[in-house]
Amino acid sequence: MVVSGIRARIVRTGILLNILLLALFSARPGRWTSLLKEIGKKRMTIQGLPPAGKFIKEQGRFFLTENIPGWPSRAFNGFFRNEINRILKPDSKGPLSTIIMAITSKCTLACGHCYEWNNISASEALAVGDIMRIVDKVKGSGVRHIQLSGGEPLERFEDLLKIIKYASRGADVWILTSGYGLTREKAALMRKAGLTGADISLDHWDAREHNRSRNNPRAFAWVREAVRNCNETGLVTALSLCAFKEFVSADNLARYIDCARRWNSGFIRLLEPRRAGKFLDRNVELEEDQFKLLEAFFQETNISPEYSGFPIITFPSWTQRRTGCLGAGNRYLYIDSKGEFHACPFCQRSAGNAVSSGMDEAISLLRKYGCQKYVLNLAD
């Protein structure tokens, strides 16, 4: 449910008071007000928006974005303690905010733009025990937001339930999925295990175009059913749109957000295509006027009162183009289905294995590598 207007202002006030309370135990009194201002400034810098005008309410909590734990919760408190520590100790850069982790190399689909294509396999490189050990390292480092991907994470459903239950203690856990096989029964079991939400890929508002992109005539129907099942079982939903050159137009964007609204999706994650996986040797980068159109769409739909009942849009590239990438061990990193640390799903260059290597060493190396943006040759 979208919360806007006076109710959103009340929620925002509650969140600010919660953060102020966290600051009471972290800093001297003279720093409390400035901490709130600095956190607000960081949020504006990262999200590119004025103070939140709407939230998504689910599970008795309020979500500003799918990348921050819902409020109120232990995960929310842990997340913002980390942000406070980053401000108090700027030289340390602080713990990560999010981990994206592929738990399987299996996938039924053969999507034309798969970034993980080189790792897709019928066999698994990581046993469930290996994944649990990685989760221990991730949570031990202070991470309070975990996204489980693949391949298709639902291909490993029984293990997925165990991982969700284990990882969700004190953290928000999401799955990144195509929607394949996400039945109402599975949604309910994941919700019971502790799953927060599902980020479901939808490449186009038009069923034929999405099915073509996914190389499967039922792909669109799976997404629609997955969103419905998540809504009915109390999971937060996000639609993930990789905005290809041929898609970016005012008409397509308007139709897409209207589709998301009709389906009651809470969020839209707007992604800029990158050279990775099947797109490694293709010219997929957007033209500057296309990016500006996406930017205007992102800001207008999140700010304008006429969109108050529509999904909240997140746009990571807005931040990357202005302040630098938040991946590469800055605020998040990616662990692939073999357990290898990478800067992000689109910039893959191993910084060690998460089963045998420590988080601190990997983060240090990834920060040294930096954001590679357009990956052409990582053999060196």
Image: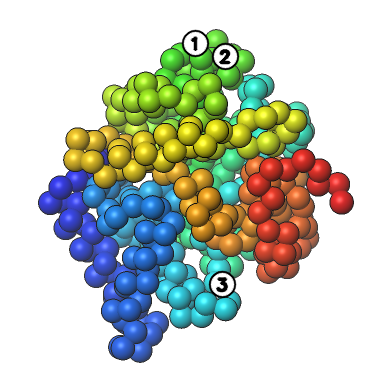
Tell me which numbered mark, 3 or 1, is placed earlier along the sequence.
Answer: 3
Note whether 291 is above or below 352 in the view shown.
Answer: above
User: What SS does tag 1 mark?
Assistant: helix
Which amino acid is tagged 1?
Arg
Asked if residue 268 is positioned above or below residue 77 in the image, the reply reads: above
- Dots 2 and 1: beta carbons under 8 Å? yes
| Near-viewer residue (355 or 249) | 249
Count numbered badges in the picture: 3
The residue carrying mark 1 is 208
Q: CA distance from mark 2 to mark 1?
A: 6 Å
Crowd rating for badge 2 (residues with CA inside 10 Å; few <14, some 14–19, many 20+) = some
| Residue to which mark 3 is pinned | 93
The crowd level at tag 1 (other Cα within 10 Å; few <14, some 14-19, many 20+) is some
- Label 2 element class: helix
Q: Position of residue 59 (x, y in %)?
A: 30, 46
SS label for mark 3: loop
Which residue, as the protein is rendered here, is positioned at the far left? Answer: 6
User: Can residue 53 be seen by looking at this rendering?
Assistant: yes
- The amino acid at mark 2 is Arg
Q: Give the residue at mark 2.
A: 212
Q: Amino acid at mark 3?
A: Lys
